[in-house]
Each structure stands twice: as structure tokens, then as C-alpha cells.
Image: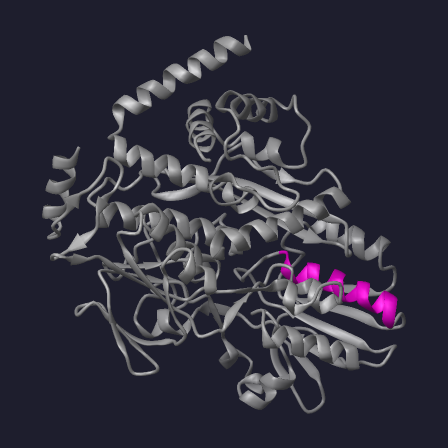
Amino acid sequence: MFRTHMLLSVAAAGIVALATPAAAQTLQVKSWASACANCHGTNGKAQGAAASLAGQSKNDLISKMQAFKSGQRPATLMHQIAKGYTDEQIEQIAAYLAAQK
Amino acid sequence: MERRALLQALGTGAAVAATGLTAGCATVGGKQAKVVVIGGGFAGSTAAKYIRMWSEGSVQVTMVEPNEAFWSCPISNLVLGGSKTMADITTPYDNLAKKHGVQVVRDSVTRIDPKAKTVTLAGGATLAYDRLIVSPGIDFMYEKIPGLNNAMAQAKVLHAWKAGPQTTALRQQLEAMPNGVVYALAIPGSPYRCPPGPYERACQIANYFQKAKPKSKVLILDANKDVTSKGKFFKAAWANKYPGMVEYRGSHKVMDVDVATNTLKFEFNDDVKADVLNVIPDMRAGTIARSSGLATADNRWCEVDFLTYESKAMPGVHVLGDAIAAAPKMPKSGHMANQHGKTCAAAVVAMLTGQEVPSMPIFANTCYSFLDTQEVVHVAAVYRYDAGKKTMLPVAGAGGLSAEPSKLEGTYAMAWAQNIWADMLA
């Protein structure tokens, strides 16, 4: 079921990409991903006790966020944050963070 | 896409030479596009850095800030309690210039001329802008408390609601207090900067008294009916961690202060005399926002478009942070101000490089409060732009409070501070 879920989200992200001009999408996705930076550092490069997200594999980031979202993965607050994002948004943010070196 | 960008830019009177797929080179009238940012707090610093990053250096950014360094309000209550120092909450502005090419000018803006698109500095200089970002924070409405409406009274009865010299001065007053006397904290009615902040302050000062002056008391006089944020956690902390030391009185609105006798006067209640008074007055947008006509909501807060943070009163001028008339469920917090900064940065870069302004802002608010020096609770929310209502709304089913106070969240709270300060200034 999880696999189907992921395939659906990838397909949906494809539709979003087609419907949005590439440059605007880039600024939109950068802007979404920048909301992670408050706790996880600019472009996902964290300091201190927060997890660094930059350069993690896209699939790992997606499955962690989905596990927070479903409640399967215990957390202090990430389960509350993850529920605010659609599967498509999680997919695009994960792709952006995975691409950060 | 480049053709589309060019057409859009020409439509707004700008000539754009696209240099890459993701960002055009921002020029206005053949010159490099210029942004001036007023104020280097959570919102202004973030906007300045992110405009430089996202325009790939093609937009020139000048930030005008009177303070020598950034002093963080979050964590400043721990300085009052003595478990952190001023050095712990201070970050220099150097990296904005060195690493990101922001021109940081230590001065204040006295006048905005939206027709000429210039700002005038107290030092006399004039700066031209293509887009202006005003992030002036808050000022206090001392005229509503006659006894505090002069500099001498304000030097004695502190707010310490802007971190910096006031934080140090209030800490000194607490250190000088004898054991067995009362510290009174007066809280303004909502909306005010950092809803849980005053209650966290009560915890930190009670924590200090417990160690250094165990017969002393914290008396909270709140203009609101009840604790406005994380109430169950704060009340449990006062009862269990600091038994008999913290007294809370709701619906106590300060109307005046007799500074000579250290007496608080209320709208409906009996006078209260205490040894150290800490009065947080009602707030409004910083002076420059009001004097330039941006504070259109009740002459107090600035109304903005939540896609761009552009002022509804003054085209070309954006307002960020605590100074805005926020959507009803958006708190005035440093975390939110940082998010305003990024949403605005994306919009400004889009406008100056002929790209489409992102139409679906989404961001979170995470707010940690220390109940003692280690145990922490949070409140979190996720906000999404609602195109129909043209405002930011909390996403239903997301967000919430801590399950219980924990030291683990204390560790995360410090990591939050470290990362958000770096996100603004490193």
C-alpha cells in the first residue's frame, strides 16, 4: 500500500510540474523547503541537535516524512508538522533537500 | 520561459537580461536592482540573506539597523533567570556582509519617500530602492500609561521585551533584590509579541528565586482573562515546580504606574505595590511604519498581502514581522517573522527577475518555552495560503502541543535557537 501511495504522489508531482512554469516552481519549492531551515539549518545543513537534511536520499526523506505523517514514527513535534503537507509537497521538498550538497 | 520572463519584466517597466534557467539578472532601468531592508531582526535579516541567495547575488541588498549586533528575544528569559548570558543570545551582523554580500548600514531610517523611492537615514544619507522592506518590530504605547510616559520612569520600570540593554538592566534589578520581596510582571492584552513569553519569564525568574532568594515571589498581572498560550503547562509548572512562589491574576489591565511608590494601578482592581516592576505595555508597529503611513489597521499594525508581504497602503513597500496585522491565528513570533522574510524574499526575487510570484506559501510555526532551565514544551502549527480568503490559515489536523514537558525538547529548543539564528545571520 505504501508503494502505491508513493507512486501516486510521484505522479501527482509530475502533474504539478507540468502545470507550473519551471522558474516559479523552483522559487516555490525553495520557499517551501526554506520552512525546514528554522530548525534544520539553511538548505537543510543543521547545527547542534537537529537532524541535517541536506544530501539525504530523496526516498529516505519521503519515507521519514510519511512515517511522521501516519504516526508510525514517534516524534516530539514532527508528526504535527508533517500532517500539514500534502504528499506532492513532501515529494518536491525532499527532492530539493536531497539535491543540496 | 526567458521570453515570458522578459515580457513580464517589460510590463513592469524593467529590462531583464536572463542569465540562467532559474534566475534572471535583476536590473531595473539598466541598473542592478536595489532592495533596502529597514531593521535587522528575525524578519529583516532573513529577507536580506535570502534575497541575496535566491537572486544568486543579482539583487543589491542594503540593510539599515541601528544595533551593533542581533540580540534574540527567544532565550532572553533564560538570561533573566541566570542560566544563559547576553553573549549566548548575541549574534554579530558580520556574516551577512562577508558571506552574503549584504551592505549593513548601522543607522536608522527617519523618512520613507515612496514616490521618489528613497529612504532618509538619521545620519543624513539617502538610499534609493526598487523595493523596500520594512521590518521595524514593535514600539510601546507608553501614552496609555501616563506615569511611564517619560524617559526617567522607563529607565526604572523596564519592559525587557526587546532583548539587549533592557535584558541586562532587568537582570541587574533582580540580582539587587533582597530575599523575601515581590517581582511583579504586567502583561498587555493580545495581540502582543510572543504570546507565551511572559509566562516563560515568570518560570525563569521563579527558578532564579528558588535558587538565590527562596522567600521572594513572582506576581503575574495579566490584562488577558487567562494565560494566552500553553496554559495547562505553565499553570502546572507554577504549582509543582515553584509551589507558593508564583501568583497569577487574570483580567488585570494596567492603567497607570506610580513610579515613586512602585505601584501599579488597574482598570478595575486594587492597586498593587511591588519591589521590582516589569511592565510590558501595549504594542504597535515600530515608529517608522506608523510615521510613514503603513500602519493602516487601527493606526497600530500594517496590513499586507500574504503572498508578497507588500503593504496594502504603499505599493513597492513590504512589511514583515511583528509589525504586520497578522492573520487571526498567526502569532507574533520570531519564527513567523523568519517565515515572512522568506516568503517576501521569494516574491521580491520573482518580481525583480521577471519570474512568477509563488502562489502557495506554506510554513510552520514552532515555539518552545522553558519551564525551568531544562524542561521544555512546544506549540506548533502549519499555515497554508488560502487563495479564496487571501490569508494564511492553519492546516486542520496539523500542529499541536507537547504531550508533556521534557528535557529532550529542551535540547531541541536550543537547537532551534542555534539554527534559526544561523538561518538569519550565518
Residue B296 at x, y = what percent? 33, 64
Q: In the image, what residue occupies the spot 60% across and 87% down?
A: B153
Q: Which quadrant of the view contains residue A49?
A: top right
Q: Is residue B333 visible?
A: no
Chief SS of the magenta region? helix
Would you place residue B425 above or below residue B118 in this image?
Answer: above
Q: In the image, what residue occupies the spot 70% across and 51% down?
A: B231
Quick check: A64 left or right of B204? left
Q: Is residue B199 magenta?
A: yes
Residue A1 at x, y = what percent? 54, 8
Quick check: B279 left or right of B179? left
Quick check: B365 left or right of B354? right
Residue B135 at x, y = what percent? 40, 63
Q: In the image, what residue occupies the spot 75% across and 63% down?
A: B83
Q: Which residues are magenta?
A: B196-212
Residue B391 at x, y = what percent? 38, 44
Identify which residue, A75 or B399, lies in the foreground. Answer: A75
Quick check: B259 left or right of A55? right
Q: Which quadrant of the view contains residue B121?
A: bottom left
Q: Is residue B275 magenta?
A: no
Would you place residue B325 above or below residue B160 in this image?
Answer: above
Q: Which quadrant of the view contains residue B169?
A: bottom right
Q: In the image, what residue occupies the spot 24% across and 30% down?
A: A21
Identify which residue, A80 or B275, lies in the foreground. Answer: A80
